[in-house]
Structure formats: C-alpha cells, structure tokens
Image (spheres, rainbow, N blue to C red):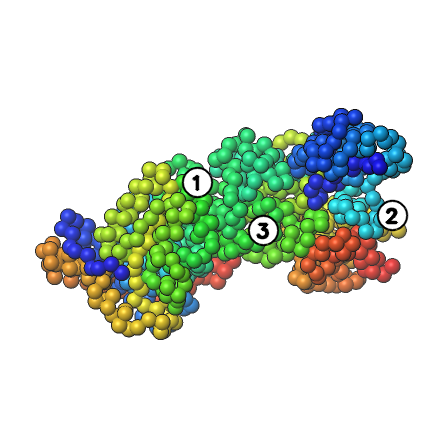
Amino acid sequence: MAVDILMPALSPTMEEGTLAKWLVKEGDAVKSGQIIAEIETDKATMEFEAVDEGILGKILIAEGTAGVKVNTPIAVLVEEGESVSDAPAAKAEAKIEAPAPSPEAAPSVPASVAKADAPAPEAAAGWPHSDVPEGVATKTMTVREALREAMAEEMRADPNVFLMGEEVGEYQGAYKISQGLLDEFGAKRVVDTPITEIGFAGIATGASWAGLKPIVEFMTFNFAMQAMDHIINSAAKTLYMSGGQMGSPMVFRGPNGAAARVGAQHSQDFAAWYAAIPGLRVCMPYSAADAKGLLKSAIRDPNPVIFLENEILYGRSFEVPAEGDFTIPFGKASIMRAGSDVTMVSFGIGVAHALAAAEELAKEGIEAEVINLRTLRPIDYDTVLASVMKTNRCVTVEEGFPVGSIGDHLASTIMQRAFDHLDAPVITCTGKDVPMPYAANLEKLALITPAEIVAAVKSVCYR
Amino acid sequence: MAKKPDARPNVSKDDLLKYYREMLLIRRFEEKAGQLYGMGLIGGFCHLYIGQEAVVVGLEAAAKEGDKRITSYRDHGHMLACGMDAKGVMAELTGRIGGYSKGKGGSMHMFSKEKHFYGGHGIVGAQVPLGAGLAFADKYLGNDNVTFTYFGDGAANQGQVYETYNMAELWSLPVVFVIENNQYAMGTSMKRATKSESLYGRGVAYGIPGEQVDGMDVLAVKAAGEKAVAHCRAGKGPYILEMMTYRYRGHSMSDPAKYRTREEVEKIKTEKDCIEHVRDLLTQGGLASEEELKAIDKDIKALVNEAAEFSKESPEPPLDELWTDIYA
C-alpha cells in the first residue's frame, strides 16, 4: 500500500524545517534506512532516513522549500506496480495546506508541536509591542541570531572575552547559538570543553579573576546544577569575601525552562533560584532585542551574570536595532503593552503568554498593561509599582514553580509598598507544583497557559 | 613518611635562614591565632597550619614574581609565605576592618591581588578548577606564570579534581597541583578513604606526571617545586606534587583529634619537625649560632605580637560595609 513520507520532527522543539535536498528522485527504489533527504532544522542539517521500503512514487515538497511543518507529507512511497494516487496524501490533498494540528481539534497532539499550540509565541513574530525605541531603524532577526551577534560584537571589541562550553566550537553549538564563532575567533577563544560542568565553570571563574571575561555556555541550565557550587560560592561571593579586591566578570548563559517533551530533568525554570543570590545579576530576555541588548550589557558587566535563554524562543523573530552599539541596561523593565485595567508582570517566555492573554482580554474590554522585567536581579520595582498604582490590580506570569517564585516576591513587594492602591489580591500565575511530566497532555497541563492568565485577570477584575 | 633526610651542605646559609624564619613565622602566627581563638577574639572555623610549614615555604622558594597561588580553608601559612602582611591576616581572623577582606571574609576567605593570592576557599576541592582557571588565563594572556593549586588528601577524592586534571592536561595549563597529604581528611585517615596507594599516581590516568615528596623537608620541597615549575613554564602542562606532611593540631579548633594517637603525633614532632630540621642543618653545619637563631626567634615573636595587637585594635568594619562589595 502506498504510504506518505512525513516531514519529521528532528528536535524536541522543531515545528517546521527546510527540505534542503532530496537524495533520491521519483521512480527510485528506496531501502529501509537509506538516507533520502537532508532536512534543515532550527539547529542543524540532518539526514533523513526512509523507514519503509518501496519506490519513491512522487515528491510532494520540492527541495529548497522552507517552512515545511512537521507531519506534512513530503513524498509518497509506493510498492511495485502501485499507483501514487493510492497514497493518503493524494486522497486528501487539502490537508497538506494546514497540517499543523491545532489544540482545539486535537487536544492530545502527539508530536513535539504540542507546546507551540500556545498562540503567544506564534503571535510574537512581528509583534507590534517592541523593546526598540521609536524611530530607530530595525532589522528582523531571531533570538538565536541576536545572541550570536551580541557575542560576536563583544568578542570583536574585547580580546579577553572568550566563549567556553560543550559543543560551542566545532559542533557550532548544540542550539546553533555559537554558529560561526569558531571560524571567526579561533579555538583559543571558542573553547570546546569535555562534559564536565563543575570543572569548566570553576576554570572559567578562576580565569575571570585573572583578567579574562569568560562566557560560559551551559547546554541547558539543567546541567548548571552540576556547577552550582562555583556559580554561587565561587563566582557570586568572591568580590564580597575579598573585601572588593577581585570580582568575577563573567556570563553563564544557556537555555532555561521547559523545552518540549523532554521530561522532568530537562524542563525547569531556574529564574527564582538565581534571583535569590546576592552577587549575581540575572537576565531573562524575551525578544531578540532583549537578547542582544542584555547579552552585550552582561558581557561588559563586571559582575557574574546569569543569562537565562529559552529554547522555544530561539527561533522566534523580532525587530532589533539595525545599527550602532545597542545595549539594554540592567534593572530597566519594558512596558510591552500599555493598559489601564490590570498590570501583568512577566519575563522570558512568560511575556509571550501574557501578551497573548492581553489580546484575548482586550476583546472583552479589559486593557492589560504588560511589563517585561528583562532582568530579575536587579528588578525594576519602580516600573511595576507605578503601573500597579495606576491599574490597582496585578497578575504575575512565569513558567517556574510556584513556591518561592518571582511572583511571590513581587506580590510581597507590592503588598508592602502599594497596599493601599490594591483593589484585589495579587495573583501569581506559575507552572504547576510538579516535576515536568513527559506525556503531551500532562506537560500542557503543567505549564502556564494564556487561558489561566485570562482567568486570573478576570478574577482580580471581579469579572 | 620518609626518613629524616641528611644534611645538605650545598644550601647557602642565607637561604636556610630565610626558610627558618618563614617557617617559624607561620608556626608562631598559628600558635597566636590558636590563643586568640581561645580568648574568643577569633570566631567560627579556624584551621591551623602547624606542622605543614615546609610545604608552602619550600614551594614559594621555587616561585617567581607573577606566579599565583590558591588553596583551601587551611590558608594562613600560604598567605604568610607569599609575603602577605601578618597584621592584615590576623586582623581578618578577628573580623576587623584592617583585615585583608575588611573583616568580611574571615579565616577561610582571604585574598591579595597584589601578592597573587587567590584565596582561601571553604568548599573542599573547589579551588582546584579555580586554580586551573587562573592558569588558563595566564596561558591565554601569553605570559609564563605558573599557578600553585594546593589541596588536601581529602579534596583529592572530589570529582571536580579529576575534571580539572583532564582539562588541565588537555589544554597544557601551567598549573602545579600540590596535594598536601597530611593524612587526615578531617577525622578520616587516608586509608579509610581510598585504596589508592598514592594520590599523585592518579594523575597517570590523565597523562599528568607527578611525584611524592617529603613535605617535612623544605629543601626536598623546593627541589621538587623547581622541577614542577620548570615543566609548567616549558609549556608541558600540569604537574602533581604529593607533599607528605602532617598537621599537629586538630582539623579545626573544635576538633579533639580522637582519630589518631598522641604517640603518633609526638613521634612526628620529635623525628620529623620541619623547623627543627632546618635548625639542625644550621647549627650542626656550623652555619648559624644559637644566638643568631635566638635573635630570629625574638624578631618573629615581636612581629606576631604586633600582628595580634593590630588585630585587636583595628576596629570592626563600619556597619555600612554590610552593603558594599556585593557588585562591582
């Protein structure tokens, strides 16, 4: 029987990809395990193997096609003497137009796209609420490109800035953030390490005391727990313990928070952990402009900076200032959307959810002000408090665990400093108090969603 | 423990007197620190270096200006040996503004950028990758400095030590790993912690050469240090020195040291003491008179008393120091 060959998901967060090259042509016999195409994901170019044997009856997606959604039929495999028209794709061609499953239609989507069904990240592309000042010429770039550009610019400017981590060099970065940096800066400054987090975090910290400015890439912040002792005890505290003699001018960066379907050990948001530590700076960018401006500031900062990226945001595009030396100061929140009815405070990917919720609420006549904190240490309390004093209501949004969350801290601060302005208790929207489950439906349930934010806002608005 | 070494007449009188003086300073300083601790002037943890003086003094004799050093919490000896001021060290022990860290670091956390002393680390083994990182910076910057990274037989069982060995050799970092094997990790003797015959030998797995050294003999330490440093400066990567030494006092001031016999300690003190060894070389070799040595003893005592006085008189840090030095 003829079967469709579908666009494969080749990484946990892949939603679409480019069909870079067909290695077989129509009419060719295909063996199980044979490499039939090259597919470019957001992370790498991957070889795609045939599962079944047969004859390549028809190529549905031509090579060079970009933006092919996961699970789209890309070719039809037929048996000897069989017709292409027997294939399911040929029978229902209309489906090819919109293959990405939507949550409404399929509540338990099996593929890795489950998380992307949250409308917010989609909406973020070309989102009108930008961090970029009015009148500044911009260019569109992904968060990934923005991070790479920030590192490259700072490495060009200061020979003592170097990048160190697992697969940052020859592999071109596990998430392609450091792609091309080895070629430009060489192995002295783009240092591949063995898998040895506490070891290289310690080495980088020592190097920072002796005149260098290391950027340490953790493949994910989940692995940084192995290095926690050096981040907290060695990097964050030495300036204080030395009476100001020597600090740790360095950046620890990498993806943080849930990716998609990678289970409990690879999905958690450490924002509140690091934000608790005096001596650290903590950045958590949302947009590409945040990513670029904050990372450049982080590399120049004389203190150890925890830079929490998000794998799902890496491929999202935003407007970024096209020219000049663009930096974002620490402790300066961005008002992504003005509103008078309620204040939403978020950071990182939470901003995407908050903005999506705000759009929903606007349809019901509730205008939310959405604040993107951008840095969690220091936190821009003034912007938050000024907004709360205006709207008299606040909902915080984050992906992390509920106990001891950033939202808890904000709620406490607002209560202490703006109690008389509050018309309702602050509600903290967070991830659920559970290890991240693997099952698609449970994972969805564990994460914060725009629907929950909408409900929280209605609650503080007594609607 | 190796046998007491023979006298080595090929060392100059000046050198021997210098080592004698430096080791004696550490010993008297530590005795004074113990006394101040007993008086309640020093708080918290206080780990004395008494017995191990030859290790740091011998290795400092092999160092040049620009070389770096980093160690654990048993750090007073290292600081005095690299030329840090006894007053500043003692005042840090008493938590006063005149201390090296303005009283905010304490016994375990002191630093001197000027003397290239990078701490003073309270987490067992953490200084090992940090020390390799200092060496990484020197290699990156293209100078010929070497970093002495000290750790104990206890730290030698921490995993990060081996992560560091691996990268230090991989990248040919100019670091001398100095294992101060005083044979007890707090209360656990080495034979209760590992079946390894030696600790330096573990470097073989990573391709790092090393050797065991009589750490009670300052001249043997210096000779081994010179060999290790030459290896590093030649760009050949790290070197391991396992210094066989002994701490006379407990792990910290609050350690009753029930895990070893009084006889064991007395035997080492009588037969192996590093200061007595140099004193013997000086007197038996006719290089110094009793009077000369007594004059040194007196000088050192005065210097230590002066440090103690300073550490008592220096004020506590002003209260606003609580909020400084958190961010640069």
For marks 1 and 2, give the CA distance. 55 Å
**Observer-nearest of A232 and A71:** A71
Dot label at residue A223: 3
Q: In which quarter of the image is residue B134?
A: top left
Left or right, residue B311 beside residue B327: left
Q: Is mark 1 on a helix, strand or loop?
A: loop
Percent across and percent down for residue A258 are: 69, 50
* Residue at the image point whose x is 21% and y is 67% from the top: B270
Using a 10 Å C-alpha cutoff, classify the residue at mark 2 as few (fewer than 14 neighbours), some (14 to 19) or many (20 or more).
few
Q: Where is residue B78 in the image (x, y as percent from the top left)?
A: 33, 55
In depth, the one of A188 and A15 nearer the eye is: A15
Label 1: few (<14), some or many (≥20) within 10 Å?
Answer: some
Numbered mark located on residue A401 in the image: none
Amino acid type, residue under disc 1 in the picture = Trp
Q: Chain for mark 3?
A: A
At x 23%, y 56%, the residue is B217
What's the CA distance linking mark 3 and mark 1? 23 Å
Name the amino acid, label 3: Phe
Position in image of residue A79 (x %, y %): 81, 33
Name the residue located 25 percent from the left edge and 66 percent from the top edge: B268
For the N terminus of chain A, which image quadrant? top right
Residue tagged 2: A105
Name the chain letter of the residue that bears numbered label 1.
Answer: B
Taking the image as shown, residue A38 lies to the left or right of residue B129, namely: right
**In the rendered view, does A429 fall on the left or right side of A185?**
right
Tell me if I can see residue A368 in this picture.
no
Relative to A208, A53 lies left or right: right
For disc 1, the marked residue is: B171
Q: Which amino acid does label 2 sit on?
A: Ala
Q: How crowded is mark 3: few (under 14 residues within 10 Å), some or many (20 or more)?
A: some
Q: Report if residue B59 is visible in the image.
A: yes
